Amino acid sequence: MVEAHHHRLSIVKQCSLLKISRSSLYYEAMGESPLNLKLMRLIDEQFLETPYYGARQMARYLRRQGYWTNRKRIRRLMFKMGLMAIYQKPNTSKPHPEHKIYPYLLRGIDIQKPNQVWCADITYIPMRKGFLYLMAVMDWHSRKVLSWRLSNTLDTDFCVGALEEAISRYGKPDIFNTDQGSQFTSFDFTQALKDAGVKISMDGKGRWMDNVMIERLWRSLKYECVYLHAFETGSEVKSGIGKWFNRYNTERPHSSLDDKTPYEAYWNLPIGGYRKSEQLLEAA
C-alpha cells in the first residue's frame, strides 16, 4: 500500500496515514536458523512416533539426543509446524464467531463407495534449508489422493485451491471431513463446500483417529519419500512428492482394498486394469 516514489506523499506521511510504523515497512522476516531447522526435522520425525508429546516432553527427548534447548523454543517451533500434542484437556477457548465448528458425521457410517467421504489435512514438509506445508484431499473409501498443494505459509488459499481442483476433476463427495484447523473452519473453505452442496464434518478436538486415513498417508509419505531426500528447493519438493503420490495412487496395493491400488478402487477397475493414458493423466 505504500508507494516509495509517490509524487505528493512522503513515506513518513503514508505510514502515518496508514497508522503503521515506518520501521515495520523496512522489516524483512528472517528464516529459521540451521539449528532450528534441524530441531524441526527431529520434532517432525518423533511426533509421528509419539503424537502425545507436548513441548515439555519433546524438549526432554531432544536433550537426550544431545540438543540442549528449552521448552519455550520447542513450543514455538511446534506451533510454527502446526503440531499439537494429542491428549484430553479442558476446553477453555471459544471459537471465533465466523469460524463455526461442525459436528463429526462419520461415527457409525459404513463407507462403501468412492466420493461418499473425502478427507483433508495439512502436514509439515522439511527441506534442507527451510520447510513447506502440504495439504492433500483424499477419498476415504479408495485412499486415492485426489489433489494436493504446497505452500510456504499456513494460509487458507492453498487449501481452497486443492479443494476446488478435486471437485472440478472428480465431482463432489457426500461428506467432507477435516480437523478443526483454522484453514478448514475459515469462511472461504466452508463456503466452497456449501456452494458445492457438500456436508461438512469435523473431528473432535485432539482426536487424530477421526481422520486416521490421511494420518497414515502422511506417515508413509515422510518415511518413503521426504526423509529419504534432502530436498533443496520448492520445485524439487513438488516433483518428488508428485512422483510419490502418482506411485501411491497407481502402483501401491492395499489389503483393505482386496489388493487393488487406490486408482483401481476409485474407478472400480480390476487389478491391473487402469489404462496407460489415464495413468499418465494422474502424473500430470
Image (cartoon, helix red, strand yellow):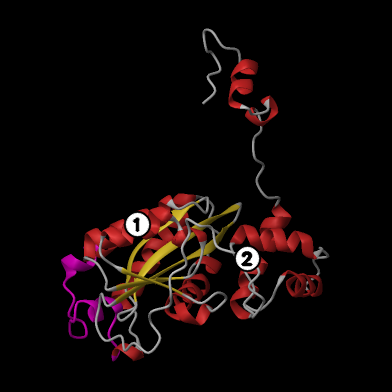
Residue sitting at x 22%, y 61%: 169
Q: Is residue 277 magenta?
A: yes
Whether 110 is drawn above or below 184: the answer is: below
Tell me the element at label 1. Answer: helix
Residue sitting at x 59%, y 76%: 48
Q: What's the distance in space between the residues labelled 2 and 1, CA to CA?
A: 24 Å
Tell me the element at label 2. Answer: loop
Whether 214 is drawn above or below 171: the answer is: below
Q: Amino acid at mark 2?
A: Ser
Decide which of 171, 281 is in the foreground and name it: 171
The residue carrying pointer 1 sits among few (fewer than 14), some (14 to 19) or many (20 or more) residues within 10 Å by Cα, namely some
| Residue that badge 1 annotates | 191
71 vs 108, left or right, is right
Decide which of 116, 223 is in the foreground and name it: 116
Task: Place residue 199 in its image quadrant.
Answer: bottom left
Q: Is residue 275 magenta?
A: yes
| Location of residue 162 in the rendering, given as x and y in whole percent from the top left corner | 35, 58
Chain-order first, disc 2 or disc 1: 2
| Location of residue 45 in the rendering, given as x and y in whole percent from the top left corner | 62, 72
| Location of residue 33 in the rendering, given as x and y in whole percent from the top left corner | 71, 50
Magenta stretch in the rendered image: 258-281
| Location of residue 52 in the rendering, given as x and y in whole percent from the top left corner | 65, 79
Counting every numbered tag in the picture gives 2
62 vs 12, left or right, is right
| Residue that badge 2 annotates | 93
In the picture, the quarter occupied by the C terminus is: bottom left
Q: Amino acid at mark 1?
A: Gln
Q: Residue furthest top?
A: 7
Q: Nearer the viewer, mark 2 or mark 1?
A: 2
